Amino acid sequence: MRTIKTAVALAFIGGVITCLSAAPAKATDTAVTCNKPVAWVITGAEEALPNFTIWCSGGSSVGNIVYFSYEVAKNPTVSQLLASVTATHAIQTSDGPMTIYSNLNDLSGSAWGCGTANCRIIDQLAAH
């Protein structure tokens, strides 16, 4: 059991370091607190193209924007990393908040399923 906890902790630390060191937040990005994050992968079987989405089931610090998404086709490896970091965060914090950096003015996600009314694109994820 201790080996599993150590492996999960190391994976989490590696994922966070990768996410945080990948690129600095853009000047247009807003740090959004996402409360009780729930993550899932949309496969593209219905209307939306495949994407990784985080739903802030406990609300977010930016009101009605409670979905944050990343287009799988843009970079499948990043989608996998986001999923891994989010899962590890959930295990370690039991629904604790996470910070998502997003350009709230960027509505281009509607082309692949991130609706403009309540969804924005994930630029960075800080699970703490």
Image (cartoon, helix red, strand yellow):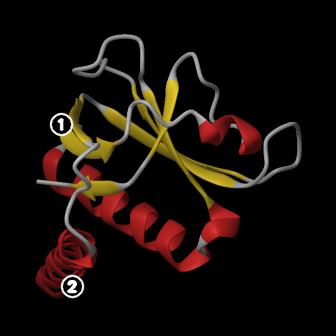
Q: Quadrant of the C terminus?
A: bottom left
Mark drawn on residue 47: none
Q: Nearer the viewer, residue 21 or 35?
A: 21
Distance between the alpha carbons at the discs numbered 2 and 1? 22 Å
Residue at 88% over, 40% down: 46
The x and y percentages for residue 121 are 48, 44
Residue at 24% over, 28% down: 35
How crowded pointer 2 is (Cα within 10 Å; few <14, some 14-19, many 20+) is rated as: few
**Hey, which residue is sitting farthest front in the picture?**
27
Residue at 37% over, 40% down: 103
Which residue is identified by label 2?
7
Residue mark closest to the camera, 2 vs 1: 1
Kind of residue indicated by mark 2: Ala
- Element under disc 2: helix
The x and y percentages for residue 49 are 79, 50
Which residue is identified by label 1?
97
The x and y percentages for residue 18 are 25, 79
Q: Marks 2 and 1: CB-CB under 8 Å? A: no
